[in-house]
Image (cartoon, rainbow, N blue to C red):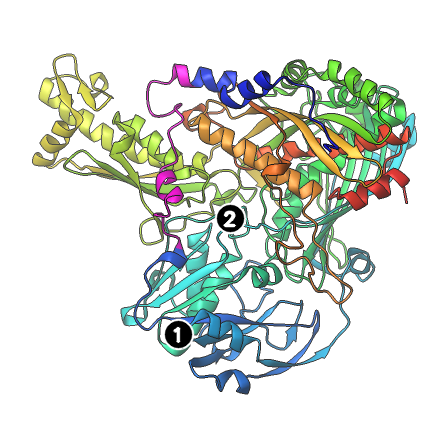
Amino acid sequence: MNTFPDTVTSAATTAALRQTPPAALAKHLAASSGACGSSAPHESAKAQVSGAAPYIDDLPELRGTLHAAPILSTVAHGQLHGLNASAALALPGVHAIVSANDVPGDPVLAAFAGDEPVFARDTVQHIGQVMGLVVADSVELARRAARLVQADITALPAILNVQDALAAQSYVLPPVTVARGDAEAALARAPHTLSGTLEVGGQEHFYLEGQVAYALPQEQNQWLIYSSTQHPGEVQHWVAHALGLDNHAVRVECRRLGGGFGGKETQAGHLAVWAAVAAAKVKRPVKLRLDRDDDFLITGKRHPFSYQYTVGFDDTGRLCGLKLMMAAHCGFSADLSGPVADRAIFHADNAYYLQDVAITSYRCKLNTQSHTAFRGFGGPQGMIVTEVILGDIARHLGLDPLAVRLRNLYSDEPLEADAVTRQARQPAHASRAAPPVQLQMHGAPAPARRDTTHYGMQVEGNILQPMLATLAQSAQYLQRLEAISAWNASHSTVKRGIAITPVKFGISFTATLFNQAGALVHVYLDGSVQVNHGGVEMGQGLNTKVAQIVADELGVPLHKVLATASDTSKIPNASATAASAGTDLNGRAAQFAARHVRDNLAAFVGGLDGVGAGAVTFQNGQVFTPKTTRTFDAVVQLAYANRIQLWSDGFYRTPKIHYDKTTLSGRPFYYFAYGAACTEVAIDTLTGENKVLRVDILHDVGRSINPGLDVGQIEGGFVQGMGWLTTEELVWNDKGLLTTHAPSTYKIPTAGDIPAHFKVDLWDAPNTEDNVGGSKAVGEPPFMLAISVFEALRDAVARARSDASVKLNAPATPERVLQALGQS
C-alpha cells in the first residue's frame, strides 16, 4: 500500500517534467554560441563512470610504501599517561608506532587558533581523537595492530552538551553580539511577541571518497604529498610546519576529490600531517586512508546549533524586534568555528529586514569531534531559525506563511521616521568586557530604507519579491493550498503541508584576504591549451567551467583546452575551494591569463596585417582581421617563430569587499545569490513517517556558464539539505561516543527519497556585479532551499494538530514528528 501517494499528476506530465529542460535552461542552450552558456559534459564524466579517473587511493604505490592506521582515544576527556604498543609491535609486518614525540617540527597543528595538537599529548579531548599511528606493511595489518595499542588514560569530567558548556562558560572563542537599534525597547512596544527555542542537528559530510593522504619523501628533505583536500596550500603549510621545513620544500598535488562539502577544507590537513610525520620517522612513503567508521569518529561535522529567541511583530506579521541567542556546538577546538558562527550571524536575516535586533553567538567547547566547514558554512544555521520564527508568527496570527515572508522581505520601502531616529541614536562601537570577551557592534549607520543588513551592507540587485511571486504562480501555490486543505479534511491519518521559502546568500570569503586567485595558461605549438589554477575539482565541475571560460577567451573549441591537477608548485598560496567562490575566483584568474596570451597574439597579428590589435578577433578556432582569416593553430606557430610569449599568468582579487572583524560590519560579500523553493510533504500521524511529494525551485545563477552543471548543483544541494533536516541524525551517547558512525545507523537520502516532481528553473538575468561571464556562484546557496522541506513538515504538523504551536527540532525524524504531533 502506498501510504504517501504523489501529488495528482498525469504520467505524461511527470515524464515531460523529467525529460524537458527547464525553460531558462532551454533559453541558455539556444542563445549559446561559444563554450560558455552550453551544458558541456563534466570534463571527467566518461572517465569517472568507466572507472578510469584515478583518486589518491588508485595511484600506483611506490616500492617500499607502508600504510598507517590511527590509534584512537576511547575516553571523551582524560589525562593521557602513555601508550603501550608492545602487542602491536610484536605483529610481523608492523614497523613503527608514531606519537607526539615523533613530530620533527611544531607538535601543534598550524591552525589559526593554535589549539589542536598533531597527536594527543598530555590529554585526550574526545572519543576518536588520534593519539598516534601504527605503520605496517598493509592497511589491514595497520588497522588490526592499532586496535591492540593500550592507552593509559585517567578520565576527567567531560562537557557533552551545550547547556553544560554555557553554564561552565566553556568556549573555543569569545562570544559575539551584533545589534542594531534597540531590540529590548522594540519588543516592549510590539503588539505581539513570541518566545521559543530550537535545536538543529549537525551533519556528516559523507563524501564518497574518504579522507586519504599519501606522503612521499623526495631528495634533499623535500616532500610530495598527494592529498584529498579542498585547500592544497594549507596542507602544504601544515605539513611544512609539522616537519620543521620551509613551505617551498613541500609540494601538494590533488587532481580530484570524491566529494568534499567542506569536510576536506581544514581536516584533510590532519591526514597529510599524520602521513608525513610517519614517513619522516620510517623514511619511506606512507599512505593513510581512514575507513568510514574511523572517519566518522575522527573528523568534524556541520555544527549543531541551539537557539533561544523572543520576537516582536505587528498584526500583519511584520517584524518589530528580535532578540536571538545562537549557541554553536564547536567540539574540542576552534577549527573554523569562528567564521562559521560569524556567517550564521550574517545570515540570520536570510531574505528579511531586521529593524531592531540583537544577536548573541556563543562558540561552545564540548568534548566531541571538532566541527568544521560544511556546505553553507553557518548560513543554513543562521537562516533556519528566522524561517521557523516567521512560520510561527503566521500561524499565531492565522495568516498564510508566504504572506508573512513577503511582508518582511528586503525592499526599497522607506523606513518610518521614528525607526530611523531610534537606530540613529545607537552609536557604532566595539567594546571588550572581562573574560569571556564579548564583542558588541551596535549597528552600522541608520539606513533610510528596508534595504540594509544588520551588519551594514546594502542589499543590491534584489530580486526576492518577483522571484517569490513567479515561483508561487508557476508552482500553483494558492491552488495547492486549497487542494491540501481538502485532502487533509478527507484523510484522517496522512496529512499534507506546503511551504515556500527564499534564500539570500552572500558570496565571498568573509576573511577578505582569501578572496584572491591565480592561474596559468599555456598555449602549445599545435594550438592546444593547458590551464592550471588554484582551485580543486571535487565533482562540482570547476575544471569544466574554467576550461569553458579559457576556450571563449581564446576563441578555440572547448576540446582544445585541458585543465590540470591543482599543484602548489604551480599556483602558490591558493585559497581553499570553498565559499562557493571557486569559479568566481579561479575562473576570472584563468580568464585574465588567457586574455594576456590573446592580447599578445592580437598585437602580433595586427602588426602582420597593419591593423590595430582591437581589430583582431578570435572565434571558433579562427583569427580574423579586416584583411585576413587564419587558423588559431597557424597563428600560434607564426607567433612562436617570431618569439611571441605563448603563456601567461593571471591574478584576480574580488573588488568592493571590506569587513571589520572586530565589529562584524561592512561589506563582506561581493553580491548575493537568490533562490526560492516550494515543497509539499506528507506525514503519517500514526508513525511520524514523512515524505517529500513535490519540489519546485527557481534559482538565480546569473548568466550560467554551464546550465547543466548548475542544475546538477541545485538538485544535489537541495537533496543534501533535505537530508540534514529530515534523516541525517548524529547521536552521541552519555559517554561522548558518536553512535551513528556508519551507513547502518546514519541515513543520507537515497533515490527513493526524491519526489517524482522535482523541477528546477533558472532565473534568467545576469549578475549585476562584474563577475566572470555574468554568472553567480551555485555551490552553497541551493542547500538552503531545503529549509522549505522543514517548514512544510511544520505546516503539516500544525494542520494535523489544528494548533498554531509547533515544537519540532531538526532533523525531523519520524520520532520527532510524532513527538511534535503530541507535543511531548
* Residue 86 percent across, percent down from the top left: 54, 87
Give residue 315's quadrant in the image: top right
Say the numbered circle drawn on residue 97: none
- In the image, taking residue 131 as reference, residue 237 lies left or right, namely left
Give residue 793's quadrant in the image: top right
Stretch in magenta: 29-55
Picture quarter with the N terminus: top right
**Residue in the picture at 62% in, 62% down:** 297
Can you say whether 21 is above or below 653 in the image? above
Picture quarter with the C terminus: top right
Q: Secondary structure at mark 1?
A: helix
Query: Of the residues under marks 2 and 1, which one precedes in the sequence?
Result: 2
- Give 378 or 718, whichever is nearer the viewer: 718
Q: Amino acid at mark 2?
A: Gly
**Residue in the picture at 27% in, 35% down:** 561
For mark 2, what is the residue?
260
* Residue 625 percent across, percent down from the top left: 17, 16
The total number of labels drawn is: 2
Say the numbered circle drawn on residue 280: 1
- Give 358 or 84, whichever is nearer the viewer: 84
* Residue 490 percent across, percent down from the top left: 85, 21
Would you call the spot at circle 2 few (<14 residues within 10 Å), some (14-19), or many (20 or more)?
many
